[in-house]
Image: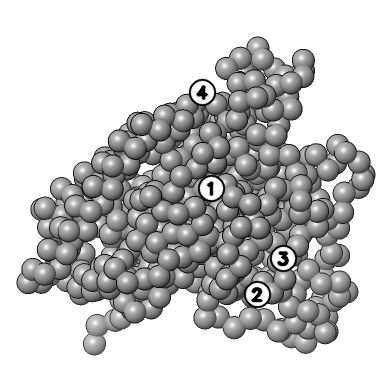
């Protein structure tokens, strides 16, 4: 009897340069191609019949005018709402009636609170004020003290740092003589917004609703091939077509509710300046499989220096932008947590919980691997407590390392940034955006022409996909006419991009090119 085949380990994948993605393009196995066809058939029916999706947290419109019909699915991360950061106070707040964040696996049971502590989603039990936790062996392990998010100095400077957006910072500094104009002479005066305040949804959608179809295409066309976006949900649901469709529906309800298209439009201008300036997370290299690597400098994250809404909005923007950087790696990214200098004030369970929730529920199959570069005894002790509560699927993608040598099997030393012991010379400096770089966004006529071509390309792709579905199944997902329509759609998306997405730090660093190609 032949021994059962086992899946390659993460090390084997990287050693043999085997992609992490199962069922990847361009050519799928017969059974997977059949499931992709069936899912497209169901999606096209939804395009014709699905009801409008409400925009619950708009940045462009007053919250008072937004529909209050928030479903549980769309409100799961409701604290990402686009109210001005200053209006949210100094401590995290959740809208009344908002359910806890989902665990890392939607179907996984939530851990029960111990010693009478209240539960607030997975890992939420750790943020309670209890003095100890019960371990698996029944013994009692001291828990880390709760993090005090209250500013140490209740003054205007503290409040400003906690709430100031990039737009606020540029406007404030442009009005002072201390602004480094010699370095950034191209920064517009304070009166000019970094992004034109005239956001208009694609497909002529109303301001406070999005159709299922419009929301789908805004997400799917971030990748070079719409099939790649659809396949992520099939893989996430073990190739169960009905479950994959249900996950797509929930994701689109969430994307519409959170106005993710507005995140792309306003971009960094509405992000927390202090978070961007300190370089909490950035991408500047690739791993051995070609996946972009996001370095997370945990020491830069101090919860009292911003409210939780700021970090959630930042994570959404980074994950949305990552899809541009990861277009050639099936949308997968590597996240490298640098624990250098980690202390108790860097413990931020809301950040971890939000990141895992976003990756598992709304950006499935985005995480390739997660490397934890640990050289802190504080984190080592914390990891022993939290690791039993991490979903096994996510946990299987986590690699613990203590040196650049242990990172080398995953990231070539020539590509590893020098601050982590590699040879790549890259020192993070936040390059401020300018209104000039987003000038195209104010060109209404050019936007209309580019959007017309984009909408036509979408319609053509849909029509050819319907024809492909009506053909006898050939056992392949490849169809010459459909491949041509895919390429035309990608080209139209690239032409539209400067009008609907503000330029990012990665554009300013030259990593994302005008044709949406990526070069680190």
Please tell me which residue is depicted at 50% across the width and 68% down the height of the picture.
361
Residue neighbourhood size for the residue with mark 3, other residues' Cα within 10 Å, grouped as few (<14), some (14–19), many (≥20) = some
Of the residues under marks 1 and 2, which one precedes in the sequence? 2
Dot 3 falls on a residue whose secondary structure is: loop
Pointer 4 residue: 436
> In the visual, does 150 lie left or right of 416?
right
Q: In the rendered image of this protein, does residue 355 appear above or below residue 157?
A: below
Pointer 2 residue: 99
- Comparing 347 with 381, the one in front is 347
Q: Where is residue 384 in the image (x, y as percent from the top left)?
A: 70, 69
Of the residues under marks 3 and 1, which one precedes in the sequence? 3
Pointer 1 residue: 263
Residue 409 visible (yes or no): no
Tell me how far mark 2 sits from mark 3, CA to CA.
9 Å
Q: Where is residue 186 in the image (x, y as percent from the top left)?
A: 57, 17
Of the residues under marks 4 and 3, which one precedes in the sequence? 3
């Amino acid at each position: 009897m032949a021994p059962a085949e086992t899946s390659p380990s993460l090390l084997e994948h990287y050693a043999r340069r085997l992609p992490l993605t199962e069922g990847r393009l361009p050519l799928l196995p017969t059974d997977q191609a059949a499931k992709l066809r069936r899912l497209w058939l169901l999606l096209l029916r939804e395009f014709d019949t699905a009801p409008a999706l409400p925009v619950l947290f708009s940045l462009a419109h007053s919250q008072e005018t937004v529909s209050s019909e928030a479903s549980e699915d769309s409100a799961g991360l409701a604290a990402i709402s686009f109210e001005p950061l200053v209006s949210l106070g100094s401590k995290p707040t959740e809208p009344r009636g908002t359910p806890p964040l989902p665990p890392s696996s939607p179907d996984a049971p939530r851990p029960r609170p111990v010693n009478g502590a209240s539960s607030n989603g997975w890992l939420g039990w750790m943020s309670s004020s209890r003095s100890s936790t019960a371990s698996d062996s029944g013994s009692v392990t001291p828990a880390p003290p709760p993090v005090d998010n209250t500013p140490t100095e209740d003054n205007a400077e503290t409040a400003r740092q906690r709430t100031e957006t990039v737009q606020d910072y540029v406007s404030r500094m442009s009005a002072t003589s201390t602004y480094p104009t010699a370095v950034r002479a191209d920064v517009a005066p304070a009166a000019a917004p970094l992004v034109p305040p005239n956001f208009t949804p694609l497909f002529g959608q109303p301001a406070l609703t999005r159709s299922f179809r419009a929301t789908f295409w805004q997400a799917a066309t971030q990748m070079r091939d719409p099939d790649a976006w659809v396949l992520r949900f099939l893989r996430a649901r073990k190739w169960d077509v009905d479950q994959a469709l249900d996950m797509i529906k929930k994701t689109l309800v969430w994307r519409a509710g959170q106005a993710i298209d507005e995140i792309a439009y306003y971009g960094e201008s509405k992000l927390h300046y202090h978070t961007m300036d300190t370089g909490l997370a950035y991408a500047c290299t690739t791993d051995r499989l070609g996946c972009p690597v996001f370095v997370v400098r945990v020491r830069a994250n101090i919860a009292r220096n911003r409210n939780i809404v700021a970090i959630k909005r930042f994570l959404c923007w980074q994950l949305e932008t990552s899809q541009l950087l990861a277009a050639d790696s099936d949308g997968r990214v590597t996240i490298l947590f640098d624990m250098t200098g980690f202390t108790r004030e860097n413990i931020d369970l809301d950040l971890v919980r939000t990141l895992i929730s976003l990756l598992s529920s709304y950006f499935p199959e985005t995480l390739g691997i997660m490397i934890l570069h640990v050289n802190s005894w504080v984190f080592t002790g914390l990891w022993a407590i939290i690791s039993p509560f991490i979903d096994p699927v996510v946990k299987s993608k986590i690699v613990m390392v203590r040196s650049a040598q242990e990172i080398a099997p995953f990231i070539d030393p020539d590509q590893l940034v020098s601050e982590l012991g590699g040879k790549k010379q890259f020192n993070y400096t936040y390059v401020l955006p300018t209104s000039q770089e987003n000038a195209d966004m104010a060109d209404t006529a050019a936007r209309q022409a580019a959007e017309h071509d984009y909408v036509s390309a979408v319609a053509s792709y849909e029509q050819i996909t319907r024809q492909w579905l009506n053909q006898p199944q050939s056992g392949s997902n490849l169809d010459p006419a459909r491949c041509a329509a895919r390429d035309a759609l990608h080209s139209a998306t690239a032409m539209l991009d400067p009008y609907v997405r503000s330029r990012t730090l990665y554009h300013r660093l030259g990593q994302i090119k005008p044709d949406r190609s990526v070069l680190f």
